[in-house]
Amino acid sequence: MTEKKNGTTEFNPPPLYPETFKLFGIEFAPRFIPLERRMQTVATLWWLLSLLLGGLVTSILMAVLFFWTRFWYVPVAYLTWMVYDLDTCNRGGRTGWIVDFVRGWRIWKHYRNFFPVKLIKTAELDRNQNYLLGSHPHGVLCSGAFSCFATDGAGFSTLFPGIVPHLLTLEGNFWMPGFREMLLGGGCGAATKRGMEALLGKPGGHASVLVVGGAPESLNSDKDKIKLVINRRKGFIKLALRFGVDLVPTFSFGEAHVYNLIPNPEGSMIRRVQDYLQNIVGFAPVLFTGRGIFQYNFGIVPRRTPLTVVVGAPITVEKVANPSVEEIANLHAKYVEELTALYNKYNPVYGDTNVELVIT
């Protein structure tokens, strides 16, 4: 990977591959393609299965070790550690060599090259300050944000030396045995008030990355619109004011098209069920289709859609111990204005001019 003068990270694009073939209307991958391309698919599938099944598989493994082997002490020790460590996600997450080690895994380079993912820097970030980055849009699984901010696969440490990114996610993800260790190893933290306060209050050199729209944003399935859920999201604005940390808008172009979502317009039965579950448990199942491992028509593997994550310029925020409603509203409006300007500037370059940005 090399760093360009304009602040982009450059990946090695895969060579041209043999043509696919169809059987019974299903488009299959070529039988003979370079190992690197296979490794990209394996890396992406591993990440996906870790996310969807990591907690379940680890739990089953621990149960097998406890009940049917003489290594019963392994699950006992891990469960004890997990209970002791459960609140780490709300205390700023992991730090030190373990984070550098996990973020530097070679598998993340293959994962980046699968889409591929590119990280664009538009302005410098001071390593002596903390920042609160807003990541948009959520998409189905935040593929671009994960690659850029929870791993070093896209070269964050090269573009922003001295700054450690912390991707914020649901606290419930840190309750899943096994999978939680990968998240914490990547520097992730909980998207809770306590978790964000712990990170924003650290000495300079930390960038908290919040996917502002959250789970509700992942339900938007319009192909010609990217609907951002942001008008009611003002808690992060208040935290930025309280801690005096600059806000940085970021946009992941291509994120909304990694998967095909089952149509769920407002008022439909599917959407009503999703909204109900969202209100009850905090998230709703997203009905999507991707591709398979050896065929391209259906499956849960993401599609090879180029993802470009553009990091905007910091919005200066003055510290206010007890911000008023008006101060929060003014900064929120400024943030939306800068985010919209970022989209309008870079969408013709990295996105699709036929796709409209809608702020809701």
Image (cartoon, rainbow, N blue to C red):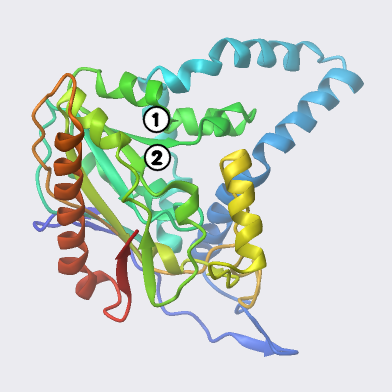
Residue assigned mark 1: 187
Expressed as whole percent of the image width and height from the top left, the position of residue 76 reads 74, 12
Q: Which residue is mark 2?
A: 150
User: In the rendered view, does 42 fall on the left or right side of 340?
Assistant: right
Indicate the secondary structure of the residue bearing disc 1: loop
For residue 222, above or below residue 83: below
Residue at left 81%, top 15%?
A: 71
For image coordinates 67% across by 89% down, the residue present is 22
Mark 1 in CB contact with mark 2 (< 8 angstroms) = yes
Q: Relative to the observer, which residue lies in front, 264 or 256?
A: 264
Q: Position of residue 332 (x, y in %)?
A: 20, 44
Residue 209 in sight: yes
Q: Position of residue 118 (x, y in %)?
A: 30, 58
Residue type at numbered disc 1? Gly
Q: Is residue 160 visible?
A: no
Displayed quadrant of residue 360: bottom left
Q: Among all residues in the image, which is located at the extreme front?
A: 325
The amino acid sitting under disc 2 is Ala
Q: Which mark is residue 44?
A: none
